[in-house]
Amino acid sequence: MPYVNIKITPDGATPEKKAELIAGVTQLLVDTLGKNPATTHVVIDVVEMEDWGLGGLPVEEFRRRQAASQ
């Protein structure tokens, strides 16, 4: 019984895109490991930007700095 937990920020996370993630991850487990899709659990946690850090910075600040350096 595989359990996959995906954590994403809300940008672009529409219900349709989340459904695509669930279907795609489930199919990957079926194809790669022969898992039964009926017992495969996929959970998506949407984490607000202010609750996510990257490179020692809140993700929005990290992205601003990355954009400024390009």
Image (cartoon, helix red, strand yellow):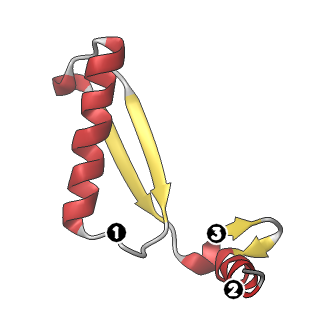
Residue at position x 57%, y 77% in the image: 49
**Which residue bears the numbered disc 1?**
13
Q: Based on the displayed image, in which of its 4 quarters is residue 34 positioned?
A: top left
Q: x, y percentage for residue 54?
A: 73, 65
Which of the labelled discs sits on residue 52, or is there none? Answer: 3
Q: SS for tag 3?
A: loop
Residue on which disc 2 sits: 64
Q: Amino acid at mark 2?
A: Arg
Q: In the shown orientation, is residue 24 left or right of residue 69?
A: left
Q: In the rendered view, tell whether residue 58 sits above or below residue 27.
A: below
Amino acid type at mark 3: Trp
**68 over 46 or under it: above or below:** below
- N-terminal-most mark, 1 or 2: 1
Residue at the far right: name it. 56
10 Å neighbourhood of mark 2: few (<14), some, or many (≥20)?
A: few
Residues packed near mark 1 inside 10 Å, few (<14), some (14 to 19) or many (20 plus): some
Give the spatial CA distance, label 1 vs label 2.
20 Å
Query: In the picture provided, is 7 more to the left or to the right than 32?
Result: right
Sequence-earlier tag: 3 or 1? 1
At numbered mark 2, what does the secondary structure look like: helix, strand or loop? Answer: helix
Residue 44 rendering spot, x and y as whole percentages = 38, 53
How crowded pointer 3 is (Cα within 10 Å; few <14, some 14-19, many 20+) is rated as: some
Marks 3/1: CA–CA distance: 15 Å
Residue at x 43%, y 58% (from the top left corner): 45
